[in-house]
Image (tube, rainbow, N blue to C red):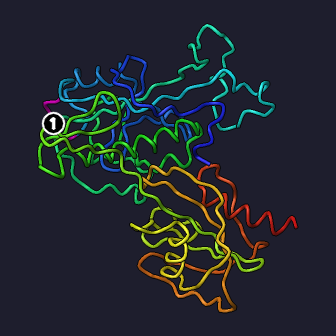
Amino acid sequence: MIQDIYPLHLDNQYKNASPKDDDTIFCFAGSTVLAKEIGENELYFPQYSEFKAGIVTNNAVDNVDNTENTDKYSYIYLFSLVEKKDSYPQNRGVDIVDNVDKSSIDKDSSIYDSENVRVVKRFFLAFKNNIVLKGDFFGELADTDVHKEYKSSLEGFDYYGVYNFRTQKDRALAYATITAYHLYGWYRDNKFCGRCGKLLERDVKERMMKCPVCGNSIYPKISPAVIVAITNKDKILLTKYAGRTYTNYALVAGFTEIGETMEDTVRREVMEEVGIKVKNIRYYKSQPWGLSGSQLSGYFCELDGDDDTIKLQEEELSVGTWVAAKDIEVTPDNVSLTREMILKFRDDVLNN
């Protein structure tokens, strides 16, 4: 899945840090990110030295106005990609996954800190000061296109739909991109206090926005949600979303409501979206999904009873159908929990 970036690790502990010239800058606009295409399925994000030079030279990075300078941007530390010395494959008895750049492996002990951790890359968010950013935070509706409505004055860089992360060769960088997008949405939507309306300030010790007037504390928003694989003997219920960029087969999914257990969410979402009852609900795995700002929990369950008639919620889904394991034509993408669950069902049935 997207978070499986061994031997690297995403260290998300907040630091009150300033960017250095070789740090990577994420600059988002709507559901797009500033990047340069350097090869097939390869996006390059500006380093701080390139970003600040582009601002000073060209006076603008996008089309909000033409009076930009470095003072009009805040640079917020996001996280680091790190490598732990004890995670060497020869010490762990496993292979390095193919989707991580093997050049990050360096056995020189002098580059590790006292906790045997080496920082591979630091990431910062370039955020405009004194501007209320408009538009919806709908990452699930993002695309992979170049968006010329957001003008870039960094030579060779354009604003690409954040959905590009699905096909990027560098899986660690893809994971960093959607995690950064999650934090961007939170920072963007929390400029003012919801209690008293005053301007919020970033805390220097932890990832928190705090009101200097009333003391209100706001932490990153993470929405719990479920992914549900409904099975009926050798069949699984596959769906397709209505009005989404993603048009491949998916599973029933939905957000958890207040006062609801995850298992109750499974029952409710299944009934709402496809109109059937389920039993034997079993937890599988979880996944952070920054595109929608959510934490996904995957569950397998079985049709309860003999009535397998699907009553489709057409506002949410365009397709709902039972598919036999032998007829599932899905390939691994090493990205989503949904895809992994579909393939697990197929392989378990066909191999038993």
Position of 257 relative to 195 (above/below): below
Residue at 24% across, 25% down: 55
Mark count: 1
- Asked which quadrant contains residue 348, the reply is bottom right
Q: Which residues are magenta?
A: 63-68
Task: Give the percent coordinates (x, y) of residue 240.
Answer: 54, 72
- Please name the predominant secondary structure of the magenta segment in the image: loop
Q: Farthest residue toward the top?
A: 110
Q: Which residue is mark 1?
A: 212
Position of 76 relative to 215 (above/below): above
Left or right of residue 63: residue 94: right
* Observer-nearest of 261 and 78: 261
Task: Give the percent coordinates (x, y) of residue 337.
Answer: 60, 56
Left or right of residue 52: residue 117: right
* Observer-nearest of 282 and 135: 282
- The question of residue 64 being in magenta is answered with yes
Residue at 56% across, 40% down: 40
- Asked which quadrant contains residue 344, the reply is bottom right
Position of 159 relative to 225 (above/below): above
Left or right of residue 351: residue 159: left
Quarter of the image with the C terminus in it: bottom right
Task: Give the percent coordinates (x, y) of residue 44.
Answer: 47, 32
Task: Give the percent coordinates (x, y) of residue 328.
Answer: 72, 70
Residue at 40% across, 24% down: 47
- The question of residue 279 being in magenta is answered with no
Of helix, strand and loop, which one carries label 1?
A: loop
Query: Label 1 is placed on what type of residue?
Result: Pro
Position of 325 relative to 246 (above/below): below
Residue at 40% across, 54% down: 139
Mark 1 crowd level (few <14, some 14–19, many ≥20, 10 Å Cα): some
Left or right of residue 84: residue 257: left
* Observer-nearest of 46 and 11: 11
